[in-house]
Amino acid sequence: MGFTESENISANGVLFQLDSGMPIGSAVDFTISLPAEIVGANSDVQLQCRGRVARSFAEGTRVGLGVVIEEYQFKRGEN
């Protein structure tokens, strides 16, 4: 998928905006970076996720992908 920013995050999934789509059901690995000041930690926290594309839709010249999170693991940053 490359580098992208999320459009929306919930407890169950993430909405991404991309230049091209992926088939529904595709496996997706991604990392969400949580800044230390937001989570009240001494260093940034990385949330490593694995999910599946649940929906795909056109939005102007971009594609929205709704990805359901199936697994996740917290990783503390090196800072």
Image: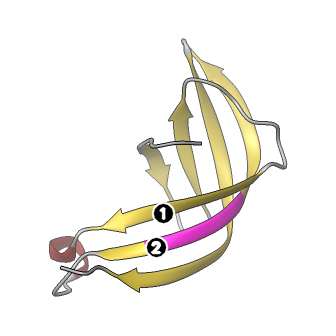
Q: Which residue is mark 1?
A: 31
Main secondary structure along the magenta-highlighted residues: strand
Is residue 46 shown left or right of residue 2?
left
- The reply to whether the magenta stretch includes residue 48 is yes
When the figure is inspected, residue 30 is found, relative to residue 36, above or below; the finding is above
- Please provide percent x and percent y for residue 73: 54, 82
Question: SS class of the residue under badge 2?
Answer: strand
The N terminus: image quadrant:
top right
Point 45% across, 41% down: residue: 4
User: What's the colour scheme?
Assistant: secondary structure
Q: Amino acid at mark 2?
A: Leu
Point 54% across, 31% down: residue: 18
Mark 1 vs 2: CB contact within 8 A:
yes
- Please provide percent x and percent y for residue 41: 20, 86
Q: Which residue is mark 2?
A: 47
Point 80% across, 48% down: residue: 26
Q: Amino acid at mark 1?
A: Thr
The crowding category of the residue bearing disc 2, from other C-alpha atoms within 10 Å (few below 14, some 14 to 19, many at least 20), is: some
- Please provide percent x and percent y for residue 63: 61, 26
From which residue to which does the magenta span run? 47-51
Which numbered marker is on residue 14? none
